[in-house]
Amino acid sequence: MSERGGHGGIAEGRGPLAAEAAALDAEDVLAAKRKDFVLDDTVYLDGNSLGALPRSVPGRLADVVEREWGRLRIRSWQESGWWTAPERVGDLIAPLIGAAGGQVVAGDSTSVNVFKAVVAAVRMAQRDSGGGAGEGDSGPARTEVLVDATTFPTDGYLAESAARMTGATVRAVAPADMAAEVGPTTAVALVNHVDYRTGELNDLPGITAAVHRAGARVVWDLCHSAGALPVDLDASGADLAVGCTYKYLNGGPGSPAYLYVRRALQPRFDSPLPGWNSHADPFAMSAGYRPAEGAARGRVGTPDILSLLALEEALGVWEGVELTAVRAKSLALTDFFLRCVRAYVPEGRTRSLTPEAHGRRGSQVSLLCEGGVDAGRAMEALIARGIVGDFRRPGVLRFGFTPLYTSFADVERAARVLGEVTGVTG
Ligand SMILES: *Cc1c(COP(=O)(O)O)cnc(C)c1O
């Protein structure tokens, strides 16, 4: 076993790739952002599972707890803006996903928002086709939900239940086949923007256009794209979208997710979870339900204020950040990582599952272990040596690159240690 680095005790690289990393860091326009996060000399490449803590969050959270809750108590719902926080935080997320204001609401988990979005989309599509399942009078009934065959599992589970509730059926379709498979009986297609396993970027504008040509609706899951690359929801005409905020948006463990409903569709958004927070006049406490206008229609119950306000503070790091610069750095980081892996990892030990083409790559690199390398053990060895990525069964090492705080020196170190770890198999 080669010498074991202590916590963050990996030797500085001395070869040409380390020199190149230093040069790339010196000209990185986002380099100054790293100091806005709490980091140590661990190489943290797991921001696609849990983003690092923005430095200003603990102070803000202490103020929310001690002053807003501790002293103002119930008054904070009005005076501290708690009641309107879901829409306010939604409007902070909006520019990061290419949405004009008033179309995004923060709250609940991604799983819950997938359910709301898919049921609402099926209801819209069934009304478009002139009736409920099987009784359309101006076209065939739209009874099918197409689900990304490579989706993060929760989306598939929820789509299945949503379909059962609306009298529809589910069919799994690979994102690349979505355009060919969508048809007159499709109600909605549910697609992940970036594949969580391989890091492949799916064609959001192209698939959206194809789904619309077929008269169906599309729901995008942005969990692995928002905050890592520009997303153009409004420009592409996407119908609905959901995403989480604890990955590239650094909102903290279990931070609230969000729901986007295109403005033109808001009046037709018929939520399957019409809680009192989405009522047009919640404090009327009326027996009958009347939906609010706008993004608030996507709310359910009382918002999770502590998490929501931590997220609001965390989103402050995006002020003044150009998403084109984020994308450029993300691609440069993943390109450099792939080069360093080729240079440092012995031939035949790992194979990249992540597309080489920039247009098809998100912000992570997934390496399939081969040649007798045990991926689970390799990741344990990496973590013990201060390189944190994650492992997905059966044999995939995932490395997420967060452009706001990952440096090129981090990338070079990670690949160098990976080379050592995968080179010492028995
Ligand atoms: C991370 C992730 C989720 C997580 O859903 P939760 O409800 O927050 O647990 C959902 N979908 C995708 C595509 C993800 O990557």
Image (cartoon, helix red, strand yellow):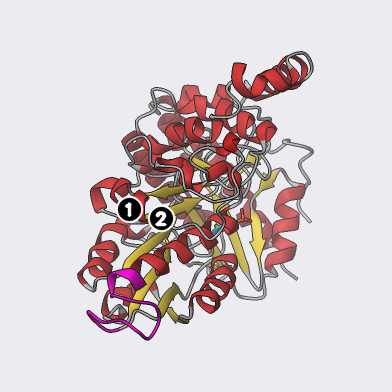
Q: Which residue is mark 2?
A: 269
Residue at image coords 44%, 62%: 120
Where in the figure is residue 1, as x and y percent of width and height?
Answer: 79, 56
Q: Which residue is mark 1?
A: 265
Marks 2 and 1 in Cβ contact (< 8 Å): yes
49 with respect to 376 (left or right)? left
Asked if the magenta segment contains residue 2, the reply would be no
Q: Is residue 138 magenta?
A: yes
Left-right relation of 191 to 180: right
Residue 284 spot, x, y in % from top left: 58, 36
Q: Look at label 2 and name its amino acid.
A: Phe
Q: Secondary structure at mark 1?
A: helix
| Coordinates of residue 238 in the picture (x, y in percent) | 31, 55
Q: Do we see residue 147 in this rendering?
A: yes
Ligand 1: which quarter? bottom right
Stretch of the chain drawn in magenta: 126-140
The residue sitting at 65% across, 38% down in the picture is 252
Residue type pointed to by label 1: Leu
- Name the quadrant of the C terminus: bottom right
Instruction: Pick whichever, 155 or 342, lies toward us.
Output: 155
Image quarter for residue 6? top right
Task: Tell me: 349 left or right of 230.
Answer: right
Q: Residue at x 41, y 58 (%)?
A: 220
Q: Is there any visible trace of residue 227 in the rendered image?
A: no
Of 140 and 106, nearer the camera is: 140
Disc marking residue 55: none
Along the viewing direction, whichever of 354 and 412 lies nearer the viewer:
354
**Secondary element type, mark 2:** loop
Query: Eyeballing the image, is 152 above or below 187?
Result: above
- Few, some or many residues within 10 Å of mark 1 (<14, 14–19, 20+): some
